[in-house]
Amino acid sequence: MVAVGISLGGNALMRWAAELGSLAFKQVDAVASICSPLDLMQSGLAIGRGLNRYIYTPMFLRSMKPKAMAKWAQYPGLFDKTALLAAKDLYTFDNIFTAPLHGFKDTADYWTRASAKPLMREIRVPALALNALNDPFIPARSLPRKDDVSSSVTLWQPEQGGHVGFVQGRWPGHLRAMPDAVGAWLMKSAGLHK
């Protein structure tokens, strides 16, 4: 069994692998995170700045606000509905909705305690962390370095790839290179082919 987490799901997967340590082997043979914000504070702040604030932040909020409002419809008064609808950035949204509903004091507490990067030295299963250095959401300076992770973690940090892009070849390009490379790494690391 192998597991892959993409973007925020990859942070959760790496944190899970770190928290379980050697016990993770009971459930998986290898894991991979792709374009994951392993330092949620740095990524959260980056998505609220510059061009990201005008392109990606509204896109995410258009998806997240209706989901939060569906929870409010199930549980009226669960959070401040007016404040949530007025939220203009992910920091504010997480302060009103995500953090308190998941037992965190506030956004800073959530982004700090839920980040995988500080725990990646505890990962014992083969783990791949793939992050492009030009990802608009994830500052390259926030990515783990070799001394931040255990010897079980492989870091792939190519110059190009964006956020889950990794287009290869001549225009219009193809997207097979990244899934093929990650799949081959997982198969080899899990001992599924020689």
Image (cartoon, rainbow, N blue to C red):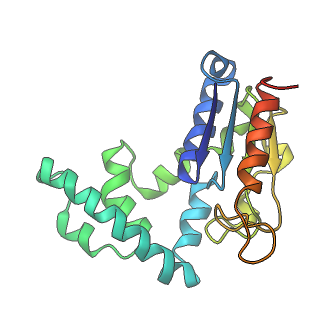
Does residue 31 lie above or below 93 as drawn?
A: above
**Count of marks, rendered view:** 0
Residue closest to the far right: 194
The foreground one among 119 and 131 is 131
Q: Quadrant of the image for the C terminus?
A: top right
The foreground one among 26 and 188 is 188
Q: In the image, what residue occupies the spot 39% across and 55% down?
A: 106
Residue 140 quadrant: bottom right
Q: How far across and down, in percent of the image, does residue 34 sit?
A: 66, 51
Report the side of 77 relative to 109 (left or right).
Answer: left
Does residue 89 lie above or below 7 as drawn?
A: below
Q: How far across and down, in percent of the image, does residue 27 sit?
A: 60, 20
Does residue 168 lie above or below 15 as drawn?
A: below
Q: In the image, what residue occupies the spot 51% across and 53% down?
A: 111
Q: How far across and down, in percent of the image, does residue 128 sit?
A: 75, 41
Q: Quadrant of the image for the N terminus?
A: top right
Q: How far across and down, in percent of the image, does residue 117 sit?
A: 67, 46
Residue 81 quadrant: bottom left
The foreground one among 152 and 171 is 171
Report the side of 40 relative to 132 (left or right).
Answer: left
Does residue 31 lie above or below 190 as drawn?
A: below
